[in-house]
Amino acid sequence: GGITLEREDFNQDIKMQAELAIAESNIIIFVVDGRSELNQNDYLVRDMLIKSGKKVIVAVNKLDNLKLQEESVYNYYVLGFEYVIPISAVHNKGINALLDEVIKDVEESVDIEDESIKFTVIGRPNVGKSSLINALVGSKRSIVSDIAGTTRDATDSKFKYNGQDFTVIDTAGLRK
């Protein structure tokens, strides 16, 4: 049935990519689709993130209007993470709130004077990760450079926001 297909999507390769990216990140943005029920793969991702012990921000994507946001956003606290932020990557809504949250968390744990904040965007296929990465490193923020990842098939994008350097550790395998 549908579940088997879904599970095959989420293969070992993808898991390995994710684990590498998680290991390199200060913080993780866990993207879920605000217009569909949480499914088995969302919970697989969640379990992986809880094990990592890293700070996780849940970005509930595809919430284009306020009514949707107010109704949906609370359903995602069930994942067990403290920070849940409604966004619409395609419409560039909630992106600044998300970045502000990333900065806040990292300031507590890392000396960020001389270092960029490294984060990764994780989620099951089709939740809008690519759109979110595009919105994050988009035209409004200055892209510093693209560095091809050496240990994995991925590209790290650097950008500045409010004077702070960020690096998105982009997992190619998770971008299906």
Image (tube, rainbow, N blue to C red):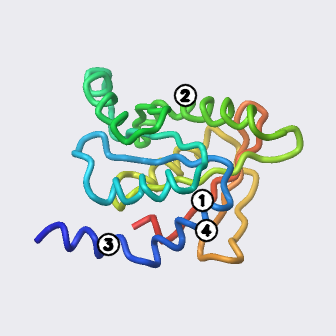
Q: Earlier in the sequence, mark 3 or mark 2?
A: 3
Q: Nearer the viewer, mark 2 or mark 1?
A: 1
**Is residue 109 rendered to the left or right of residue 34?**
right
Q: Residue under circle 4?
A: 20
Residue furthest left in the image: 1
Q: Earlier in the sequence, mark 2 or mark 1?
A: 1
Q: Residue under circle 1?
A: 22
**Is residue 103 rendered to the left or right of residue 176?**
right
Q: Nearer the viewer, mark 1 or mark 3?
A: 1
Q: Which of marks 1 and 3 is nearer the N terminus?
A: 3
Find the distance from the CA under tag 4 to the CA under tag 1: 5 Å
* Residue 9 image label: 3
Quadrant of residue 89 in the image?
Answer: top left
Q: Position of residue 135 (x, y in %)?
A: 52, 44
Judged from the image, the secondary structure of the residue bearing numbered disc 4 is: helix
**Residue type pointed to by label 3:** Asp
Find the distance from the CA under tag 4 to the CA under tag 2: 26 Å
The residue lying at 56 percent from left, 66 percent from top is 19
* Residue 97 image label: 2
**Is residue 41 rendered to the left or right of residue 157?**
left
